[in-house]
Amino acid sequence: MTRVLVINPNSSTDVTASMDRGLDPIRAVCNLSIESVTLPEGPPGIETQAHIDSVVLPVAALIKREAADAYVIACFSDPGLALAREVTAKPVVGIAESSFQMALGLGYRFGIVSIRSVSIPRHLRYVRQVGLSDRIAGDRAIDVGVTELGGASVIDRVVEVGRQLRDEDGADVLILGCAGMGHWREKAEQALGIPVIDPTQAAVSRSVALVSLGYDKVA
Amino acid sequence: MTRVLVINPNSSTDVTASMDRGLDPIRAVCNLSIESVTLPEGPPGIETQAHIDSVVLPVAALIKREAADAYVIACFSDPGLALAREVTAKPVVGIAESSFQMALGLGYRFGIVSIRSVSIPRHLRYVRQVGLSDRIAGDRAIDVGVTELGGASVIDRVVEVGRQLRDEDGADVLILGCAGMGHWREKAEQALGIPVIDPTQAAVSRSVALVSLGYDKVA
Amino acid sequence: MTRVLVINPNSSTDVTASMDRGLDPIRAVCNLSIESVTLPEGPPGIETQAHIDSVVLPVAALIKREAADAYVIACFSDPGLALAREVTAKPVVGIAESSFQMALGLGYRFGIVSIRSVSIPRHLRYVRQVGLSDRIAGDRAIDVGVTELGGASVIDRVVEVGRQLRDEDGADVLILGCAGMGHWREKAEQALGIPVIDPTQAAVSRSVALVSLGYDKVA
Amino acid sequence: MTRVLVINPNSSTDVTASMDRGLDPIRAVCNLSIESVTLPEGPPGIETQAHIDSVVLPVAALIKREAADAYVIACFSDPGLALAREVTAKPVVGIAESSFQMALGLGYRFGIVSIRSVSIPRHLRYVRQVGLSDRIAGDRAIDVGVTELGGASVIDRVVEVGRQLRDEDGADVLILGCAGMGHWREKAEQALGIPVIDPTQAAVSRSVALVSLGYDKVA
Amino acid sequence: MTRVLVINPNSSTDVTASMDRGLDPIRAVCNLSIESVTLPEGPPGIETQAHIDSVVLPVAALIKREAADAYVIACFSDPGLALAREVTAKPVVGIAESSFQMALGLGYRFGIVSIRSVSIPRHLRYVRQVGLSDRIAGDRAIDVGVTELGGASVIDRVVEVGRQLRDEDGADVLILGCAGMGHWREKAEQALGIPVIDPTQAAVSRSVALVSLGYDKVA
Amino acid sequence: MTRVLVINPNSSTDVTASMDRGLDPIRAVCNLSIESVTLPEGPPGIETQAHIDSVVLPVAALIKREAADAYVIACFSDPGLALAREVTAKPVVGIAESSFQMALGLGYRFGIVSIRSVSIPRHLRYVRQVGLSDRIAGDRAIDVGVTELGGASVIDRVVEVGRQLRDEDGADVLILGCAGMGHWREKAEQALGIPVIDPTQAAVSRSVALVSLGYDKVA
């Protein structure tokens, strides 16, 4: 059976479980094995450049040892994506780039709800790198730690920041800028009335399209 | 069962059948009813602005009378897309806009293989309208009539034009700019070595993502 | 005598008369017959996509039956412009595209005063389609019905919205985004101190230039 | 009677006469005094930055001493335009900026036929300055001296260069990049089949629009 | 010894002395003669287009009579830069363009602290001319006369305007938009916490790089 | 004494020595210690993504253990730049980004002479990431291995490729896209007649400016 492997590059199995639950609607429609794994070598959360750079080689190693038809790197900094594409001929997608692409079909300008302010310049560099800077409305942080993302009050900050992105920055679609925030999608959509993207869902949907249509080369 | 309705706005049932066969790889993976219909009021092929404007109201009428969970307008000028989105709350996608979005994930600059030269300025206006003019490498025509697209020699022109788009214009992914050209995807990819997009496949894959993840609002 | 035919695609003769009065300053300088007609098949006001699409074929039919040296489609959604250019070899201009072009010579970033919020995404798509998205400062609606545009209090909303476009969005020239708003140009300019464009004036001035200099092909 | 004053900043009265003849079609339609004058202090032709800078103060002085309702600076480097706008409250337009604006309504990408290669970087800086670099297809020189522009063989070079701009660079409208080249417009259009702009015609047409509609502030 | 000549095109020797003191840190590191001169023909401050145009020929004349290995035109409107590059084969740099280039290496979007509001459109035209309009966050004026720039309260306005550029416009690096403001760099950086550019320092540093590496042609 | 540390992240001491000789013109003018070191952990040449990712942590470790006032990462993929800026408060610059910035002051569109074709998409992503995609004319490879860069015939390929970038792509300034190619600058400039950038020179010149003017934060 065709296998899509979703790699959480941090070591928090709670985050893996939470993002995996968000993939059930895709499983309900598609006959593929969609499997989520945790990178044991990863830090508990990926918050700094040092964290990002520390998982690049381990993610590539995992891909080399785990056979699959498509791989998803499920961290919003898409760590190791370039190397992963060098070590396998199968499609490898990042959740950030996939969420940007999905956003283009749901609105004209997307807003990113980030975890931490320190990540915003990195996100903006990435949006420029993939040539979509005309399509981003803004990027604002809730400033909560990755490991606290399960807390009940987090959704209030997500909605507050989402409202600023919508009303002050002009976003008509929002991206939750962390695999661990994806489970807030439904509540955020209800509160804000515009489409909200769980980036892991976006990446897995894209993987389904790629493998069903037989595309290996991605960019 | 969830139903995706693919509307061929021209009246050529051969074109409908040809593009429908291209959807089998999606059916193999996804448990959805994907159904293709022909617009009886449409012209045999949509080649002029008069053709395009003549199907706008009939496409909207068909959508109003046929219940579905998502609609695909399967003509590369995306005729009546704005009106269709006004008459139904379900997602409606065009094959041109969907192919542009898929192209962003397969390469950096896409080339369009058009049927007729006269359509090129219209395509370019459309690419600008959706904000992607930095991502198009070029648009070149094979200059063959829509109703002759089944002819065996057509693929030679597709490959010739595709090579120009790749080598002279710098395209790293190609879009076949007509629902009736989609069946040449495999041969074109083999000859050219870069990803080639059947726009109807792109639109249906996108519809599967939209309905499985519960998005109604598209743009 | 050279004839410029100005077509109001809605059926409100009051709007036709109001916009026609705005053309007197052009008549005072130019020896051309500038004539305004009402499209009998049009709706009282063009506010929805269904309204726009309903007048496309009638506008083209009117152009085919009425000989003129240039045609102006006097509705800010420029309905049927592509088709009109296909059915006649004479220049056909829309009032929206003409107002954008005039704005480029009066300021650096233009603001659009729209009638209804629902039209704003359509305007923005159009500005992108003609490649001028770097030049638009903003688009804001007064949210008054087309048929109420003659009301005395409308100018207060126009000025209020114009002030926001000027002060918050950075517009240095304004476009009144409806043929039926053109008569507020003078009062708006006095109140705001920046150039304000009556789009029908812009389109007729452009037509005068085109016919006097012998241009048929427009874009 | 409303007066439009067209200033040739070089001292060649032949050039003044030639460009003035190109204004007759506008005079045929519009009841304005359109008058061309030669700047006695100007060099025979404006080819270097030193030439441009030498006429800035004399052009401003001429404008201060000659009353008119609108002024046209008829040299393709638009010398002294900023200063001219500072010394009079009447509209002052340059022929280069006016030709760019007219080009936007005649095609999507304009090509400039320049006299000398050395001017091309200056033209490109100017196109960027007015925010239209996405709309220029190319700029190529015929490399003939300004004072030789009356020669019969010049048109062959204009057509040759125009063909390169059209076929290699993708221009769909051409601008003759010198007041003294304007009289080749008709022959160039016949040979090339796309609109060609005489920049002095463009500037005077724009002035007619500005004065008839009562605009003082231009940009 | 290699000589960099810094030309203050206004006649205020106080401004020359003030900006010259800002060059001492460069002198401390580099073995070059860096010399500042005042243009006697200049106005006391350069605030209008007439001021700018009045110094173009005198600056070129000064460059012709003063031998140096590189020239800096130390006024933020870079007056006469094009002509200066025509009259000498040595590199000539303007302080505005040099500050834009330095800003690109210190942040992503720069803000300009201008002296007078009337200069802002001119600055914006210039930023567009050099192709950097995507990198400017904003331009705001302190509205103080050039000759009053030595006043102690000026720094308060600089900081106030800098804070608006940083917090409202999103600037992450600031440019002091006048040679006479450069001495406020240190205080502004301490108050605002982001890099601040003295444009004369930027131009002289660039000149040092150009002459040490042997570049003549600049752009 | 102020110290600029130039790090060659590959282990070829020949490359280190070659690029270090290119810094002598800067040493001749500036009183700084400019010192080049080789990263012992690096591969002989950095040609693949795996090579790049393998030096990220070692470069950061070297910076942590070697005190300096500014650091230059002397490989054209700027490996580990983001992490390096996280581990030290001193300015760290990459030679690629520095060469882009220098190019902006030497021409309008730069061309990159790359070693290998496989690096070109990575370079283009980087140019987009730093927001300069409007300024790149092209990127072409000589397709010679890093360790063969000392060979005498390499300059012929550099000139051949440089000529294509200049004549076909419109570059008016060239960047040698590898620290190991820098010593060809002089010969390339003589053969091509446009400025050529040795990226290590560009980065060290920028470092001199940064440390002399006291900037810590770079971007």
Image (cartoon, coloured by chain):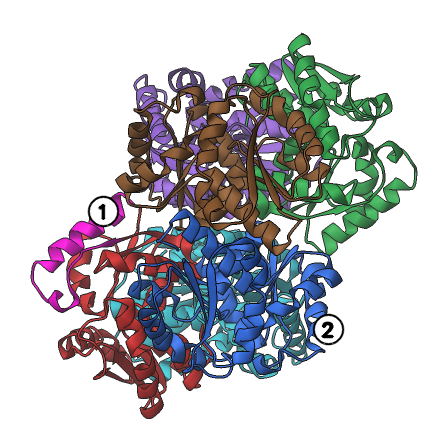
Chain colours: A red, B cyan, C purple, D green, E brown, F blue
Q: Where does the image place residue A51, in percent across and percent down from the top left? A: 26, 72
Question: In front here: D193 or F219?
Answer: F219
Q: How many marks?
A: 2
- SS of the residue under disc 1: helix
Question: In front here: A139 or F209?
Answer: F209
What range of the chain is rendered magenta?
A140-169
Looking at numbered disc 2 in the image, what kind of residue is underneath it? Asp
Q: Where does the image place residue D63, in percent across and percent down from the top left? A: 66, 14
Residue at 8% x, 58% y: name it.
Answer: A153
Numbered tag placed on residue A164 in the rendering: 1
Residue at 25% x, 44% y: name it.
Answer: A167
Pointer 2 and pointer 1: residues touching (CB < 8 Å)?
Answer: no
Q: Is residue B73 above or below residue B131?
A: below
Q: Where does the image place residue D132, in percent across and percent down from the top left? A: 57, 42
Q: Is residue B24 visible?
A: no
Looking at numbered disc 1 in the image, what kind of residue is underneath it? Gln
Q: Is residue B183 visible?
A: yes
Determine which quarter of the picture holds residue F93.
Answer: bottom left
Among all residues in the image, which is located at the extreme left?
A152
Q: Which residue is mark 2?
A: F156
Q: Where does the image place residue E68, in percent across and percent down from the top left? A: 65, 40
Horizontally, is F218 left or right of D140 in the view?
A: left
- SS of the residue under disc 2: helix
Among all residues in the image, which is located at the extreme right?
D152
Determine which quarter of the picture holds residue D76.
Answer: top right
Numbered tag placed on residue D106 in the rendering: none
Magenta span includes B99: no
